[in-house]
Image: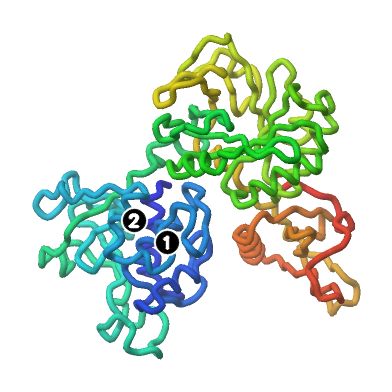
Amino acid sequence: MSVQEYAASEMRYLCAAEDPGVGYSQPARWSWYERCDNAGWLTSDADGDCSSMVAGCYNIAFHNELGSPYTRDGTGGMFPVSNQTWTGAIPALAAGRGFVDRGDSWVGSTPAGGFRVGDLLMADGHVAMAVRDADGSFDGRDPLLAEAWIDSHGSDGWDDPDEPVGDQDGGETRLIRYADHPFTQRASWTTVLSYEGAPVASRPESGSAAVLNGIDISAYQTDIDIAAVNPDFVIVKVTEGVDYVNPAWKDQIRQAYDQNRPIGVYHYVDGSGAAAEADHFVTEVADWNGHVMWCVDWEAGGNDAWGSTAYLKEFIEAVKARNGGKRIMLYASAAVYPHDVAAACDTGKWIAQYADMNPHGWDDAPWTDGTWTTRIHQYTGTGRVAGYGADLDLDLFHGTADDFRAYYKAPIPTIITDRISLLEGADDMRVTHVLFAYEGTMYLYCVLSHTYTPIPDPGTLEDVKFILARAGARVEDWLEFNRGGSLEVGNLKAFGRFVPLDG
């Protein structure tokens, strides 16, 4: 699904929802956003206003389609979740987030080419969004509009602090045809903003054949302009050993993020201690966990652990234990690639093999592709492409942008719903799974299989609970059985055998 489609679907859902539903209130304009889960489902009745709803719906779409960090304060390139986002500020804010002002292309009552799904229609003091009809159709000349309109008293919601929460009359948030809208009839619309920032819709859907052209960079490319190079993805060196940090990595990642490109980060192993190196890497990247692909660079140069597959395995497993079970991408030269480690640790394969050392440009079909089960092929270290005047490492990723971003999150574990008694004499308490914590990470323990898996983030945890509940399973917290009254356990392995989220 494209960003536009996701935002429009979310806006339509909010304006049509009844139980729970959304009403109109400027004092509580962001309450709907606070009461949505990360996917955009309302958890209780709430209120909004026109600007907070269109902006918040795009925030949710950016998160779910582009991997944008989902924070309640609106950081990370999203629309600010604050009074900075109001109707008069929408055009300027939108311009910096991939929207194009089509106000100079109006022909008659509609813009040239008609309206598009997800368009923002602006008027003085108001904004609405073009959405699909209930049957999935879309009329580019007379689209359905979704909007937060006005509260049930005909005011902005400031006059009655005791006003019930949610839409009381079916008109506070509503769906209305463009032709029927009073602003259309009064010719009050001033412009239309169309999201064109990331061509997600034009990329192949996940699972279809695709090749992405990308770059991997380090401190040697501090002057790079990602927008000018225009790669399909970017992988950035962040750390090396136990103390080195690329001073430019945050700027390099931010550039890639602002261009809505899939992002990877890598650590160069130097053999100074597997656990310490893993700690250094994960600590540095912690704020981006869940929004990047984790990679390890395994080379002979400057690596005291070179040749030790045991060291490499220990490092990879230590990173996975600290990053919530995210899958690792393992980089090495084709001549010495540790295929045994890749198999044992279930890593993706990023293999370097060059035909020669001559300069290369973008290449959609390097000569050795298909030789291995390779995800990424680095085919030159002397890449020359428009937008950068020096050598670049050029890479191919076999898959779509969605396939790349699949590495960002550990999959939800397989759910087993068979019920057995956990504790004898516990009032016939029957459970299938137990949630517990160990050193700040949440885990899900399956009683039947005696295995446990990490839960990477609160959003995923809620998804797991919801799926389990719908399946008829029963989940209990460890504190229900722990007389100390804590979710924390002192001995992780006492729960059983660790299983990766995708295992």
Q: Residue at x 16, y 67 (%)?
A: 183
Q: Secondary structure at mark 1?
A: loop
In the visual, does 295 lie left or right of 314? left
Q: Residue at x 75, y 25 (%)?
A: 302
Q: Which residue is mark 1?
A: 80
Q: Nearer the viewer, residue 412 or 316?
A: 316
Q: Is residue 19 visible?
A: no
Label 1 crowding class (10 Å Cα cut-off): few <14, some 14-19, many 20+?
A: many
Q: Is residue 482 visible?
A: yes
Q: Residue at x 50, y 19 (%)?
A: 383
Q: Is residue 414 above or below residue 393?
A: below
Q: Where does residue 96 sit, x and y in percent of width and height?
A: 35, 49
* Disc number placed over residue 93 in the picture, else none: 2
Type of amino acid under label 1: Pro
Nearest to N terminus: mark 2 or mark 1: 1
In the visual, does 138 lie left or right of 97? left
Mark 2 touches mark 1? (CB < 8 Å): yes
Type of amino acid under label 2: Leu
